[in-house]
Amino acid sequence: MNKNLKKRINTSIILFIFAILFILINKILFFLATFIILSICIVEWYKLNRKYFRKKKIEYNLVIIIGIIYAFIVLFTIINLRGDNFEEATFLIFILSICFASDIGGYVFGKFFGGKKLIKISPNKTISGSIGSFILSLLPLFLFNFQISLKNIFVCLIISLSCQIGDLIISYFKRLNKIKNTGNILPGHGGLLDRLDGIIFAIPIAYILKILLII
């Protein structure tokens, strides 16, 4: 296991443990923690786009406003997914575990198998990495002892796809601004936005699936 992979896995495990604790301990505490985390993401989003948009004030302001609005959408949906009981809280942990598994799967498969690039806007992303994300996203079904049904498999794959799209969107803006990371707060990841790019796209999708009674 190379050094970066070890850092990435260790950071993911630590973040996941803290996420579980905040989700289960108290809904208000979870709200405050999520609000702070999303506020940091907004600051990183602001700094991320300064370079490319610094001479385009209207576009820059629009990008920042969209980021803030979307952060509130994420806050609203994740709090509603958290719900008021243990069952709903466990379901949110299940969704987050799909995101973490998908991220690790993409990184591991991409590093070990390499191969053809997935898309130009993110040269480090490979087709093998994308396939790995889909495969490992199914792991939480076994960890949570969920029924292995077509519906549950579909949910895992959709959540994984959302994570990958979120990753690609943030990668596009990083490439646009010619920077590698949105920050350096997390070892092996960079900024919070680097780590949560997939999750912040997957959470609203999970909420929509729940509203539509698909999950």
Image: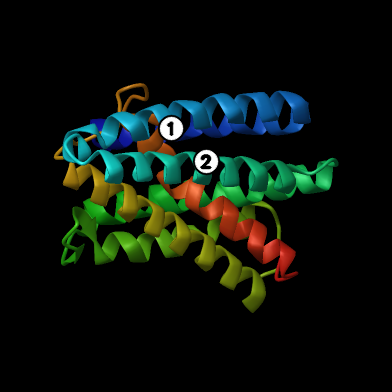
- 101 sits left or right of 52 in the view: right
| Residues marked 1 and 2 touching at CB (< 8 Å) | yes
Residue receiving disc 1? 42
Q: Residue 31: name its quadrant.
A: top right
Percent from the top left, x then y, of residue 178?
A: 14, 40
* In this view, 194 is above or below 214: above
Residue receiving disc 2? 71
* In this view, 56 is above or below 203: above
Q: Work out whether mark 1 precedes mark 2 in sequence or the reverse, and give the earlier one.
A: 1
* In this view, 27 is above or below 141: above
Query: Which type of secondary structure does the marked residue at label 2 adopt?
Result: helix
Three-letter amino acid code of the residue under disc 1: Ile
Q: Nearer the viewer, residue 104 or 34?
A: 34
Q: In the image, what residue occupies the spot 21% across and 40% down?
A: 53
The crowding category of the residue bearing disc 1, from other C-alpha atoms within 10 Å (few below 14, some 14 to 19, many at least 20), is: many
Percent from the top left, x then y, of residue 67?
A: 43, 42
Which disc number belongs to residue 139? none
Judged from this view, the residue extending furthest toward the front is 58
Snapshot colouring:
rainbow
Query: Which type of secondary structure does the marked residue at label 1 adopt?
Result: helix
